[in-house]
Image: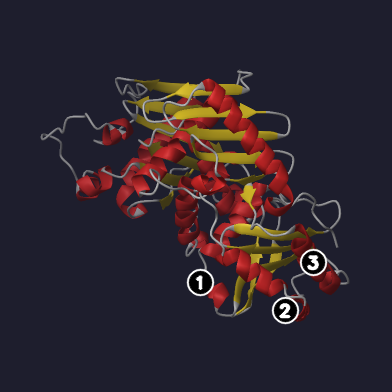
Amino acid sequence: MSDVGSSQSNLPDIPSLDIGTVSLAEEYDADAEDNDDKDISQEDEFFHTLEWKEKKKHIFILSSAGKPVYSRHGSEDRLVTLFGVMQALVSFVQDSEDSIHSIKAGNCIIAFLIKGPIILVSVSRTGESVEQLKIQLLYVYNQVVSVLTLTQLTNIFEKRHNFDLRRLLAGSERLIDHLMEFTESQPAFLLGAVKCLPLPSATREAISQTIISCCSKIKNLVFAILIAKNKLITVVKMKKYNLPPSDLHLIFNMVNSSESFKAAECWTPICLPTFDPSGFLHGHVSYLAEDCQACLLLLTIDRDLFFTLSEAKQSIVEKLRRNNSLEAINDAMNRSCPTTSELGIPNLRHFLYKCSSISQYWGPKLETPYTTTEEKDRLLQLYQNLHCALHRSGRNLKLLHQQLHTETMLGWITAGFELYITFDALVTKQNSVNTVNKIIRLMKKEEDRLFILSTPTF
């Protein structure tokens, strides 16, 4: 892989290509000087505007033929020249029998992800690493596959190399937009894990057994998933199948970005790219009841099961109501997550704990000084930097302690868990060790309530 970049914004020399007045690095170099002598077309004027250039991150999708597919900010039709530059850069490196990885231009990083006939590009000044940007791009790619399936995507471009993919993705832009906001605000994507709705283990078991009793005789039902407020309540699965966090994140994103699910029962196709990128599952999606805003998804390979699953859903709701599980779900949804200070651990500002074997995590509610949007973003970036340092390829780092100006950070990876902690700035190392031990004891004590330790099957 080629890592193209320099602090001087030097792009590859492409003397044989006419790429007009647009330089991808210059557009995002805060220190670049304007050239008043340039003959800027109406198309170029759009991305020379201050409003567009001030965006800290742009996401682009294009085909290998250079056809625009998606732009996070602005209309693709007004950015055709810029898409041409990106395609030219990819082609130039491919002509050298290599593939472009990233470009560094001042404080800007341009990350590329090439997936068959699709090219994804992130242009960012957020301070995220190339690896983190490429994780986000992979999620965006998976969102596209989720709408089309990999089989359809591949067949389209095998038949027509210059096909305009926007025809098939029309209306799906909101899913990608929402997904990007999701990835930039939730640590779930950084950790590759999901967060569960805290419930007593007996209550969660009762909910799972209710779903099993109503669905066990339905053939070809693969998954039953119950979620609320971006948190997982339970998953019941067909034996031998598993649902990875990356696919659950796409399901969360679909539910949260679709208000229509709240109005009525819906029947929707969805491809889960990690589970099976080649075909659709068919999902019966509905909220449990007007007085319980948890969402139930029943996923099957049979496209003719809508009415069967609708009846099963009604039976599930009736049984959950009779055994008081609906009330328990509502109580859990309305209960505020404890803050760090409520945990009673001195010197601790915040932490994220991931149970590695089940890919689930938990962290307390943010409080002062991390209550404003700017401070929340800054804290997430600190966790991103810590995570990147620990997981950087070629290093076997398991423990990292960082003394920063405004806080102290500690990251620890073991066989069973990952722990990322934010302390007061002047905490001592001994106090840090004591705090780590308290957090581990707390997580062990609460694991039955905070995590789904085993997944029930039909």
Contact between labelled residues 3 and 2, with CB atoms less than 8 Å apart: no
Residue projecting furthest to the left: 36
Q: Is residue 105 visible?
A: yes
How far apart are the alpha carbons under marks 2 and 1? 24 Å
**Residue sitting at x 85%, y 71%:** 213
Res. 206 mark: 3
Q: Quadrant of residue 239?
A: bottom right
Please give the residue where the numbered disc 2 appears in the rendered image: 321
Q: Earlier in the sequence, mark 2 or mark 3?
A: 3
* x and y, in percent, of residue 353 in the image: 62, 40
Q: Secondary structure at mark 2?
A: helix
For the residue carrying disc 2, how many other residues have a C-alpha within 10 Å: few (<14), some (14-19), or many (20+)? some
Q: Nearer the viewer, mark 2 or mark 1?
A: 2
Please give the residue where the numbered disc 1 appears in the rendered image: 259
> Identity of the amino acid at label 3?
Ala
**Residue sitting at x 57%, y 63%:** 335
Check the image and report above or below for 66 versus 103: below
Q: Count the labels in the image.
A: 3
* x and y, in percent, of residue 302 in the image: 78, 69
Check the image and report above or below for 365 versus 336: above
Q: Is residue 390 left or right of residue 71?
A: right
Residue nearer the viewer, 351 or 116: 351
Q: Is residue 288 left or right of residue 99?
A: right
How far apart are the alpha carbons under marks 3 and 1? 29 Å
Q: Is residue 443 left or right of residue 22?
A: right
Q: Earlier in the sequence, mark 2 or mark 1?
A: 1
Q: Is residue 58 visible?
A: no
